[in-house]
Image (tube, coloured by chain):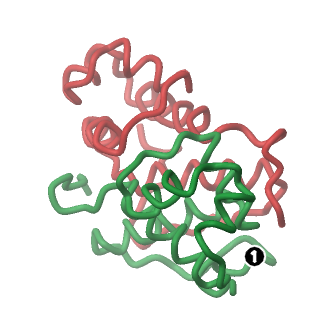
Chain colours: A red, B green
Amino acid sequence: MKSTPAAVPLLRAELGDVLRGIRRAQGRTLREVSLQAQVSLGYLSEVERGQKEASSELLEAITSALGIPLWCVLREVSDRMAVFEGMSVPETLPDGVVPVTLIS
Amino acid sequence: MKSTPAAVPLLRAELGDVLRGIRRAQGRTLREVSLQAQVSLGYLSEVERGQKEASSELLEAITSALGIPLWCVLREVSDRMAVFEGMSVPETLPDGVVPVTLIS
């Protein structure tokens, strides 16, 4: 069950991908979300492209602007990385929670 | 379902707490894990105390040294943050995966 650093995508890449997916599913622009999260557009763009590590505070601001709890985003990132490592992840979520990928 | 930044613990604090919990459950010292992960002891200590953001690469190195996939650690962090927000998280994990909290 050891992880394989060479093959597994980096956390910031998966995180950025999930954040961008949520924003696009909501039909919102980088500008709209960056304004609401009070982060620069360039910074948000770099985070989404996995080119910059987001601090905990800014990650909280971004997910808050997206209206999605950070733990939900982390769960999606975790599931993606698990699937990448060949794990089968059950489709269970806490009661009443809609999977991030289904939120529009 | 909006997150509440003021009340929810920061990601790096939860992450550090989970990493320290795993290391201690394994009965290993900061020195042992830092040597294996090739990160400085001071850096690892700061990450565990939630005082420093770990880069994706170093997080991968630390979890690899602990013998736990990063996605497993993220899942535990996500679950903790969800519980903090009052969510009920089911006790399901991918087939064959032992919960991080039970690994010794």
Q: Residue at x 33, y 41 (%)?
A: A63
Q: Along the line of sight, which residue is nearer the eye, A61 or A27? A: A61
Mark 1 residue crowding within 10 angstroms, few (<14) / some (14–19) / many (20+): few
- Horizontal and vertical percent position of residue A88: 78, 63
Screen quadrant of the N terminus of chain A: bottom right
Task: Give the labeled residue for mark 1.
Answer: B97
Q: Quadrant of residue B66?
A: bottom right
- Horizontal and vertical percent position of residue B40: 58, 50
Q: Quadrant of residue B13?
A: bottom left
Q: Along the line of sight, which residue is nearer the eye, B33 or A56? A: B33
Q: Along the line of sight, which residue is nearer the eye, A79 or B46? A: B46
- Horizontal and vertical percent position of residue A84: 78, 47
Q: Is residue A100 above or below residue A62?
A: below
Q: Along the line of sight, which residue is nearer the eye, B99 or A22? A: B99
Name the chain under label 1.
B
Say left or right for B82 vs A1: left
How many marks do you count on the picture?
1
Q: Residue at x 32, y 14 (%)?
A: A41
Q: Is residue A39 above or below residue A92?
A: above
Screen quadrant of the C terminus of chain A: top left
Instruction: Name, please, the residue furthest toward the left.
Output: B6
Say left or right for B75 vs B33: left
Amino acid beneath label 1: Val
Q: Residue at x 39, y 78 (%)?
A: B88
Say left or right for A65 vs A94: left
Which structural element holds mark 1?
loop
Q: Residue at x 35, y 45 (%)?
A: A56
